[in-house]
Amino acid sequence: MWIIIVVVIVGLPLAAYVGFRLGAGRLLARYDRALQNGRDRLDPRDELPRYLPADLATRWPGWDGWYALAIPRDNGVPIKAIRVSMMTGLYGLDGIDNYQELPGLSPFEVVEYLMMLQIDSTSHLFRRYLPKQTDLAMRREQLLVSVKDWGEISGQWPDYQVQMRDPMAGIEVSLTYAAKHLIWWADLPRLFTYVAAFGDIQGTISLGDQEYALTGEGSFEHGFARKPFNYDGLLKPLRGLQKLFRFSLIHYHYNLLISPDGLHGGMMLAQGVGVDFRNLGGLYFADGRFMRLSDIAVEDVELEELQSRSSALPVRFPKTWRVRAKADGGLFEYSATRESPPAHIAREMIYFDFRFTGTYRERGKPDLPFTGHGYGEYVRI
């Protein structure tokens, strides 16, 4: 009898897990439109707010986020990378969101305003959670999202504008984007969509009394997701199991690559309890040729411990890592090393920039080497 009990206790959860792994992949493959969507232009419905209610004071059924990356080309400019964003809500998970910074509001009542600058060997982070009802303004007909007194994001394919400021540090960023190429990271209708538009950037940045002209490359991104509730309660039992068994509950590694040779693209690896929910990427070469990436594997080469502002325990973070992926009959791989100090967004969410060297190999053809600068996001729970 005890053998039967052991089989039931161990076997049923194992069978459920195996079924979940198989079913999750098939379900995503069936409903995800990311690999079928066109890459020549962005439709207005995919850049406009998807979850904007008539009354900003009501509870929103989901969130929208607009994100912009700029990698300056001029080595004389002290700015190595710029990352800014506005989100009309939080992801819904403590450790990825920083609940400790909420100004007495619920995660459903705030807009997140964020600016990260990598300045030589310093990382500057300015992030605030502000009440949507009073500090957020949005337009429905053409993209215009603004946070009162601090900044706005606007435009229509292929031209976008970003105006952001950190009033505490006297920093102002003004950028225009001329988008050329798209990569769809996900498109699950009425659930989660995320797209990145790569292109040229130009503009200015003011650091106190000094103003610099900026030119280079970057990305303009829009993501939106349905969020009926926070997910902490659902993950609480799994977090408890982590105390008994060592396993990764969530692993997320997102890299955007910008090369002076004209290559740009990136990869996204998102896993939950060992199941790949996102494993894809893409590269655009200087001649406009696109190459899809699949079967992405990330190897941590050197780890470092980062101290979080919201936790007494340090977080292990890859200082150097290696990425390998299949690429349309060839192999693309690169090694990356964190550049400036990373920005600890929350207990388990880290933003950073990095340098990379890579190679595309295809049988019967000479290797194509690449070097460049990148931006990344990392979570391991």
Image (spheres, rainbow, N blue to C red):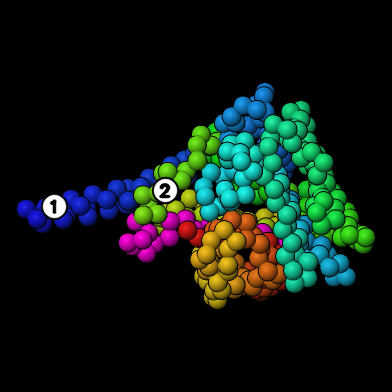
Q: Which mark is residue 60?
A: none
**At 42% across and 43% down in the image, what residue appears?**
233
Question: From where the camera sits, is residue 181 visible?
Answer: no
* Residue type for callout 2: Leu
**At 61% across and 39% down in the image, what residue appears?**
105
Q: Nearer the viewer, residue 19 or 262?
A: 19
**At 51% across and 47% down in the image, what residue appears?**
93
Vertically, is 188 above or below 98? above
Q: Which residue is mark 1?
A: 5
Horizontally, residue 277 falls left or right of residue 104, namely left
Q: Which residues are magenta?
A: 241-259
Percent of width and height locating residue 206: 88, 57
* Residue type for callout 1: Ile
Element type at mark 1: helix
Question: Looking at this rendering, what residue extends furthest in the top direction?
Answer: 54
Q: Which mark is residue 235?
A: 2
Percent of width and height locating residue 111: 67, 40
Q: How many marks?
A: 2
Question: From where the camera sits, is residue 274 visible?
Answer: yes
